[in-house]
Amino acid sequence: MNQNATPNKFLVISRGQWDDDAKEDDVQIAIDRFYDWYEANLAAGRMLPGSRLKPEGKQVSKVRILDGPFTEAKELVGGYWFIVATSLDEAASLAAENPCLAFGLTLEVRPLDPARAEATDLTNETPVTWRTK
């Protein structure tokens, strides 16, 4: 991490499932290597703790609460953690070292936006019809 730049926090979302043709022993070795890598980066201050997610969940909307999750297997979120880095590229480079990537998981790295939300902000929640105003 560049010592002169201000560190930012990035959310890392682990998605997907293990490759069908992967051997369980090989995946377990990758998982063990992941925890060694993860814990070393926590100790170095390059990451902040996260967690695996249990399979069950609820989807909450203005009209109801439904059992979930509701995504395709390739989009399932298995867990999350945080990276502390000076840029998105630096965060993605660190995430690319994750040993579990070799067996089918993918990682989404997103910068956190500490600003309070405003309806006029252009965000993921902004409807397409609002974007042309």
Image: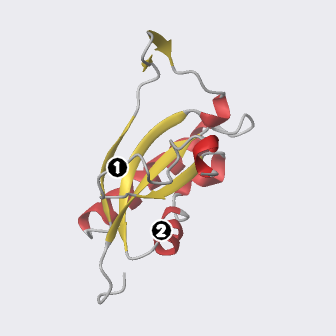
Measuring from the top left, give residue 129's x and y in whole percent: 63, 41
Q: What is the three-letter code of the residue carrying label 1?
A: Ala
**Along the viewing direction, whichever of 123 and 66 lies nearer the viewer:** 123
Indicate which disc, 1 or 2, sits on the residue closer to the N terminus. 2
Q: Residue at x 36, y 81 (%)?
A: 1
Pick out the residue farthest to the bottom: 4
For residue 15, above or below residue 109: above
Secondary structure, mark 1, is loop
Residue on which disc 2 sits: 94
The residue closer to the viewer here, 72 or 40, is 72
Residue 85 visible here = yes
Number of marks present in the image shown? 2
Residue 17 seen in the current view: no
Mark 1 neighbour density, 10 Å: few (under 14) some (14–19) many (20 or more): few
Q: Which residue is mark 1?
A: 117
Q: Position of residue 124 (x, y in %)?
A: 53, 46
Q: Residue at x 33, y 46 (%)?
A: 50
> Which one is nearer the viewer's eye here, 80 or 60?
60
Q: Which mark is residue 80?
A: none
| Residue nearest the viewer, comparing 38 with 108 | 108
Splitting the image into 4 quarters, where does residue 19 fall? top right
Looking at this rendering, what residue extends furthest in the right direction?
21
Which residue appears at 38% of the width and 76% of the height? 86
Looking at the rendered structure, the secondary structure element under dot 2 is helix
Q: Position of residue 4 (x, y in %)?
A: 30, 90
